[in-house]
Image: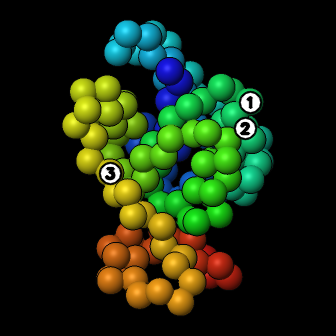
Amino acid sequence: MKIAVTYENGNIFQHFGHTESFKLYEIESGNITNTSVVDTEGSGHGALADFLKKHTVDTLICGGIGAGAQNALAEAGITLYGGVSGSADQAVSDLLAEKLSYNPDIECNHHGEHHHGSCGEHHGNCEHHGHHA
């Protein structure tokens, strides 16, 4: 198993499409065997999904993420845990212990659907096209 986390200064970076680095965790038998921080060499969800696939990542932990990125990850066969914040290392430990709290409904650009107030809780990290947080 290989987990990637959007990464900045030890914490989970909150805007998937703009992340500049991932911390990669190699997992064997439920334990972290190796970690590395890698630069993304570009941005945009399509390029990032390809980047993760190239690094044989099968699981992603991140903060805010839009529908396009989710679709690209699904096509790449990558399991997504979105809406996570705080320490990257802690999030991976929590995931391995099956106690990671994440938001399965993190997607923010529901075209024409009601947001139920969830977008406001992300402090501007949602990927609204044409607006910069």
- Disc 1 versus disc 2: distance between alpha carbons? 5 Å
- Disc 3 versus disc 2: distance between alpha carbons? 23 Å
Tell which of 53 and 5 is nearer to you.
Answer: 53
Label located before the other in sequence (3 or 2): 2
Residues at circles 3 and 2 in contact by the CB criterion of under 8 Å = no
Q: Is residue 130 above or below residue 1?
A: below
Residue 44, given in percent of the width and then of the height, sits at 72, 57
Label 1 element class: helix
Tell which of 64 and 132 is nearer to you.
Answer: 64
The C terminus lies in which quarter of the figure? bottom right
Q: Which mark is residue 14?
A: none
Q: Which mark is residue 102?
A: 3
Label 2 element class: helix
- Residue type at mark 2 is Phe
Residue, x 33% and y 46% (percent of image)? 86
Which residue in the structure is indicated by mark 2? 51
Label located before the other in sequence (3 or 1): 1
Which residue in the structure is indicated by mark 1? 54
